[in-house]
Structure formats: C-alpha cells, structure tokens
Image (cartoon, rainbow, N blue to C red):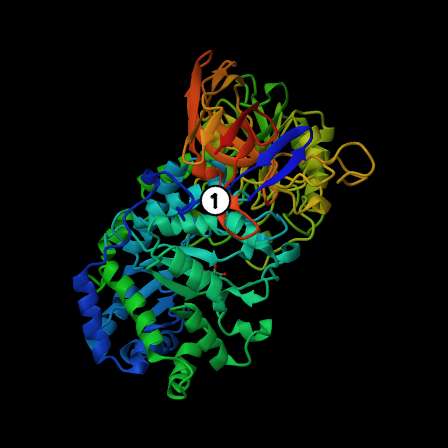
Amino acid sequence: MTRCTSFRGLRACVLAVFVVTLAGPGLADNLRIPAPKLTPDVERRIDALLERMTLADKLGQLSQQWGGETQDMNPDARQRALDDILGIVRAGLCGSFLGAHGAEYTNVLQRVAVEESKHKIPMLLGNDVIHGYRTIFPVPLGEAASWDPDLVQAGAAVAAEEARAAGTHWTFAPMIDVSRDPRWGRIVETAGEDPYLGQVMAVAHVKGFQGGDISAPDRVMACAKHYVAYGGAEGGRDYNTVDISMQTLYEVHLPPFEAAVQAGVGSLMSAFNEINGVPASGNPLTLDKILRNDWKFRGMVVSDWTSVTEMIAHGYVVDPAHAARVAITAGVDMDMCSFSYRDTLAESIKAGLVDEAVIDLATRRVLRMKFALGLFDNPYSDPDREARVTLSAKNRGVARRLAARSMVLLRNEDNTLPISTDVRRIAVVGPLADNARDPLGTWEGRGRAEDTVTALAGLKARAGSDIEITYAKGCETRGGTADGIPAAADLARAADLAIVIVGESEDMTGEGHSRSEIGLPPLQQQLVKAVHATGTPMVVVLMSGRPLTVNWEAENAAALLEAWHAGSECGNALADVLFGDVNPSGKLPVTFPRRVGQIPFHYNHKNTGRPPTEERYTSRYIDLPSSPLFPFGYGLSYTTYAYSDLQVATPRIKADGTLEVSATVRNTGQVAGEEIVQLYIRDLVGSTTRPVRELKGFQRISLAPGEEKKVRFALPADRLAFYNPQMQRVVEPGRFKVWIATSSAEGLEGEFEVVR
Ligand code: NOJ
C-alpha cells in the first residue's frame, strides 16, 4: 500500500503497513492467569454425562432462572416457594439460579441437585457481585479512578471470598463496557472511557475473582459483560441502539473483553443492545467469529436477563422459538430467564431447524465450568466459613484503602485540604453526609446500610475530641424543600470550615437510570451556594456514580473532591483523605464535561478537519469553551510534581520493536505523595484516522518531598496497532507524538517514528 499525505506541515509517507498477526491487545504476560483447569478426564466425564442425558435434561442445563429465597414472613408461603424451587432442581429443569444467597440456603438447593436429581449435576449459582458482596467497595468507576490494579484485584478477591463462602459460584462481573457518555446510568459500573484502562481493570477484576483456580473455596467464576458495545447506547439512554463503525467496535469496545479472555475469564454475558442492526445476543460476528474463533474462548456465554426473547422487540426475530434458535446458534450457551431454550428448542430440533450437536456443545461448555468450579466434588459451602470471612476487619481494611485511593482531588485553593490543625469547628452539611445507603452505590450486593461508616461518622471518629463537628442535612438528595438550608448555612457560618457532601443518590445511577441532565439537583446547588455565601472556607465532596457538570462548584469551592459512591468504608476513607492521612492520588477515568451538550466527550477523540480554535468555522460550540471541565487522567495531590527531561531513547523503531521513553518526575511540595504517571501517544497519520491521544501505559510512583525518579516506559510497537479500512490490525510506518503526562491534557511531548 502506498499513499502520501500531509499533516499540518508534517509530511508522512505511508509506504507499507505491517499486518500484526498477534490477535491480543499486547498486554504483558504477567497480566495473564491460567484459564480454569480443564483436563481430558473432565472432558471424558462430560462425554459420559451427555451420553446419559435426554434433550430435556440438556436444555435444563442451559436454562437459568431466579432461585432466591422468598422474603415472605409467612412460613407457609416461604415453604411453598422453596418447594417450588426444589421441584425445579429435582426435575433438572434448570441448571443455574441467580439470586440464591447464603451457605445454608444454597446448601439446601445443592443437596437436592446432587442427591435427588436424575444426573446429580450440581447447580451453578450466580449473583451480581459487582463491587463487593457484603463488604462493599467503591463503585467500579471509582475503583478505576484509583488506577491501582493491584488493589482492585485485592478488592475483587475479597468479594470472591465472601461470595463463595455464601454459596455463590459465579459473579456477573466485571462489567467492562467502555462508556463515553455520562448520561448513561451504567457508566457507574464501567472503568470509564478508555479502552486501555478498561483492559487493565478488566484483568485486575478477573484475577481477583478467579485467582489461579476457580475451584478454590475463596474464588468465583467471573463473567465479563456486557458483550459487547452496550456502552455505545445512543444518547446515553439505557438499552438503546448502538450504531458504531467496525473500527470503534474493534478499537474501543472489544479490547477489554479480549483482555478478559486472555486473562482466563470463565464466562461472558451477551448484551441487551443491538450492534449495527444485529442484537448482541444473536450476533454470530461477535459471539462466534470474534469470541470463539479469533480469541479461542473456551468458557461459556450466558445471555443477559431475557435478552434472548428481547430480540423480538428489536425486530430481529418473530417469536421465542426463533429467538432461541438464533441465540444458541450464534453462541449463547445459557439463557437467563427468558425460558425460550427450555420451552422451544426441543421442537426446533425435531423440526430440523437446529442441530442437536449445537445443544451438546453448549451443554458441554456449561458442564465444563461446573467441573472447573469443583462443584461435582465439592458442591456445598461452609456456613462457619461464611460467618468467619464476611465483613472481616481484613476485608474492611481493603475496602478502606481502595475507597481512599479512588477519591480524586479536583481543586484545592490555598491548600484548603488537608484540614489544617488550626481548624477547631467543622460544619458537615448535605444530604449525603449522614447517609448510609447511598454510598453503597448501585448493585450493593448483600451490603447493608447498617454496616456503612457514613461520612459524618468517619469524620467524627477521626476528629476526636479536639475538633467539634456539627451537622445539618440541609436538603434531600432529590426533591423535598429548601426549609433546612438556612439552618445548615448557620452552622457553616459558625464553623472554621464547611464540608458540604452532595451528589447523587444510588438510584440516580445504574441500570435503567440514565439522566438527561447531570448536574447537582437544584436544591443541592442552592445548599452549596448558601454555605458559600457565609464566607466560611468550603470543601465540596461529591458522591456520585458519574461525572457531574459542577461548573459553579469547580470555580467557587475552596476544595472539590470526587469521592464516588465509596462503599462500606466511605466515611473512614473520606476522613483519611480530608485529614491528610492519605494523600489523594486518584485520577479521573472519565472526562467531566462542562455541559450535557458536549457529550459524547472523551479525550481520545479524532482531530477532525477543523480542530477547535477561537475561529468561527472550526469544530466547536459558539456558547462553550472546547475544553472539558476536568480532563481524563486529571487529579491533584497535596503535593506538587514537576515533570522534566523527556527522553525518547528509540526515536526510530520497527513494527516489531519497542518504544523506550522516560522522564523525570520530582516531588516539589512539602509532603510525600504518589503520582500516576501516564503515557500517551498519537499516530499522526493513518489509513484510518487516529485519536488525538491514546493512553498506552501508566505507572504509580511514590516520592518523598524533594525526591525525584526517572520513570521509564517500554512499549512494544505492537501496541500502536489499529484497524485499517480492510479491518486488518496494523502498525503503519510514520511519525508519532508521545507524552509522559500527569493527565490527558498536559505532559512533556516528544516524537518518534515507526520505520520499515
Ligand atoms: C441485567 C443486567 O444488565 C446485568 O448486568 C445483570 O447481571 C443481570 N440483569 C442479572 O441481574
């Protein structure tokens, strides 16, 4: 291929392309873990089972339904519900439940499965353990803001330990959709807008949930979801249509899934959305070609909740039988809750519309994971273990560390934070200050409000008797009246410092909770302004599951901290950060727009033919600056860092070479700190246009005051690959920019070239 073009005076001749045969995203080998144990002996045991199973038995294994314990207080009604569920297990009508919790209850189900059902096949029990089981961690967007995969992995391991002890074998996590639209309620479950950070967080979660052996008593099988491109919903409206280019599919949405597969994830969940006209739960391209054929995935795929029969509403199939045929043939092994497999596939096979071999293969995949989980040998959970590990001090410790690491300092005028030793009286104000439920966030697992350390409780505990803490709620999170605002302002007026804790309730985020405006609700804005008007220095703490358009607060608060929905240890972690016991090091995993009108807004956008300037006919809005409120990768510290001496050791590399680049980072402030040093590149000319920046790596470094370190990155050129118009994964020769940076909007800039 030969093509010449120019880029703002830079001339680049693309003389050849290097087609990269390596399918993987190029993650380092140490990010990989062994896939679940699968031995020839297991395959033989599956052969023997399949031999004995009827078609109905197999379809039972491919069906999942709700199997939770009824909360009815009437003992008779409870017993009847349990009898129904046990009847289903005994008859082998269903191979997997979701919603069953607790060692005792799940053991009852398992006993019937392995002692009374025809083939004695254990049940596979799945649950949404998204950011903790009983010990709740920050919501995943917050976890990603830590940029700390080791700690995220440790958090997922805690969740796995608690969940498995309570009879859960399988978590419907990690959610690894990439989202560039903060209106989407489910952005809270993602690692944000960047595919590379998404990969890193995906792998951290898979390693944490699964460990090296999912049969261990403290591990669960992970489920990478929602496969795929669910985060591309038009308008940020949940479940909405996804219509994207193949380049965006391959370069933005698929990479975290590929990384999860490489990391040995045991299962994937097919998404609700369509992709370019074909629903994800019946999509042969994504499920069969990409997942099974290209990536060699050997685990199982479960549909999302009724996503199989929702293909009828999509207008893709005519009825449940058609839906089931399309889904199973495309590669969805297990049907979550639509019952279409169990109810229709036998007929379709009889009519010759589906080959029974397809059912055998799906059943094999499900049984394989049951073997890998060790369920045939050890189907039960130990209630003593459950009591011992649940919400242990060790687990709370991990949650506290991760919550503190997730918090992002967005503004800190005149070193308002950490709280000065001169402060004697603090007014803590706001609807999220003494709130135990909302900090648990959406998908709170089995987390309980009574186990949450609220912000107020955490601050009081840390302040001790030396500092007086007063509290007023001021207003509700949503709705209500302004009646409480004057009293809250009075408290602020009488204090040395006001901490205003505002943001979103948990039900303003999550599934089915997209918002068309993403600012603070009006009364909360009024509260913040009333406190500010008192003249007392004001720290605004945001608790949210998405970026918020907090323009006024970003200009007027003395300090602004994004604390997300931080989980069970919210208050302790917040106190750690506000009092300076932990120096904040979190960085935004997602762009904070100034206004909803800027969305979709992500740092890794294309340049366009008319990049935004102050000029009229450029790609901009006439009523808004082109910059975000806060860029991706941004986050302050109680110290400052100076970046210097960028060195590109390899200014010319070949497509199989490695880029080596370094810079010196110095702690120029008064306290020790940890900085996330980020590596970005830009491919200046491509056969498909490239983003203005792409994150390619990051490192966490700790620096004492005055200390400096040389930070080196080695980036295999394979990681520069992208998809050309023929959808080949290529590294093209030409010039690149490279930055070592504290955020996506800054950095030391250098150049290198990929040569033939
Ligand atoms: C629907 C959600 O989309 C999915 O994330 C979840 O795992 C299932 N429901 C099961 O609760």
Identify the element where label 1 is drawn.
Answer: helix
Q: Is residue 321 left or right of residue 547?
A: left
Q: Is residue 664 left or right of residue 165?
A: right
Q: Which residue is mark 1?
A: 198
Asked whether 105 or 285 is in front, the reply is: 285
The picture quadrant where one finds residue 614 is top right
30 w.r.t. 108: above or below = above
689 w.r.t. 273: above or below = above
Residue that sits furthest to the right in the current view: 616
Where residue 258 appears, as percent x and y from the top left, is: 42, 50
Residue that sits furthest to the top in the current view: 706
Q: Is residue 483 visible?
A: no
Where residue 335 appears, as percent x and y from the top left, is: 42, 71
Where residue 238 appears, as percent x and y from the top left, is: 59, 59
Q: Residue at x 50, y 57 (%)?
A: 228
**Label 1 near ligand 1 (CB < 8 Å):** no
Circle 1: residue type: Gly
Q: Is residue 567 left or right of residue 221?
A: right
